Image (spheres, helix red, strand yellow):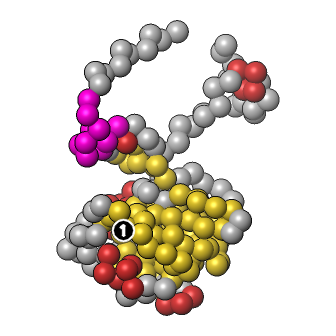
Amino acid sequence: MSVPTPPTPLVDADGDALRTLLRQQASTVTIVTAPSLVGFTATSFTCVSLAPPIVSFCSDLTSSSWSGVSRARHVGVHLLAGHQEELARRFATRGVDRFAAPTRWRPGPEGVPILDDTLAWMLCRVVDRVVVGDHAIVLAEPELLRHADVGSPLLYHRGAFTGLAATTDLDPRRASAAPRAAGSRRVL
């Protein structure tokens, strides 16, 4: 059994301290696209409501994409697959044409660019934008969506891209029900 590491001392909750704390949260990596051929990598995507269906993401007000997102009636939200780290990096880089090769995409409904081979994507109608500090929270209603039946998401954790571990179920009572490779044995 491992011994937990001692907690760090209490600090004031300023922007830098909050950023450090949030590095402990693993987030699904998404790319948001808008009809004016703008897009950016975001880890702030979340479901807000199921009835009615509403999702959200945040955008930095100083980003080069905000101008296009701030005017868009529809956006695309793409959940990246584990193998799409380079695509995530491209859409997080300033000063590059994010839609140029090697990015593979096609025009989708409402003129929203749809990225190829993502784990999932949805076309969303923007219902509100709420400016809070240096970001805007964009609230959007999914209208169309598509997802793969296989694959794992690209995650962002502790300042780096990562993926899910091969075995995520560590409960030994449930592990016995999982198929094992020939010649392998379960260790409790």
Which residue appears farthest toward the left when viewing the image?
95
Q: x and y percent of residue 78 in the render?
A: 51, 68
Q: Is residue 16 magenta?
A: yes
Q: x and y percent of residue 110 in the render?
A: 54, 90
Q: x and y percent of residue 142 in the render?
A: 61, 74
Residue 48 sits in quarter: bottom right
Q: Which residues are magenta?
A: 11-21
Q: Residues within 10 Å of mark 1 (few under 14, many from 20)?
A: some
| Amino acid type at image mark 1 | Val
Q: Nearer the viewer, residue 157 or 14?
A: 14
Q: Residue 82, can we see it?
A: no
At 60% across and 67% down in the image, what residue appears?
54
Q: Nearer the viewer, residue 150 or 24?
A: 24
Task: Please indicate whether residue 181 sits to the left or right of residue 35 in the image.
Answer: right
Rendered view: 21 above or below 4: below
Q: Residue 176, can we see it?
A: yes
Overall secondary structure of the magenta section: helix
Rendered view: 175 above or below 38: above
Task: Please indicate whether residue 138 sits to the left or right of residue 65 in the image.
Answer: right
Q: x and y percent of residue 8 in the render?
A: 30, 22
Task: Please indicate whether residue 50 sits to the left or right of residue 122 in the image.
Answer: right
Q: Which residue is mark 1?
A: 131
Rendered view: 140 above or below 185: below
Task: Please indicate whether residue 34 sits to the left or right of residue 180 in the image.
Answer: left
Residue 135 sits in quarter: bottom left
Q: Quadrant of the C terminus?
A: top right
At 56% across and 65% down in the image, what residue appears?
55
Dot 1 falls on a residue whose secondary structure is: strand
Picture mark count = 1
At 44% across and 10% down in the image, what residue appears?
3
At 35% across and 63% down in the image, what residue appears?
132
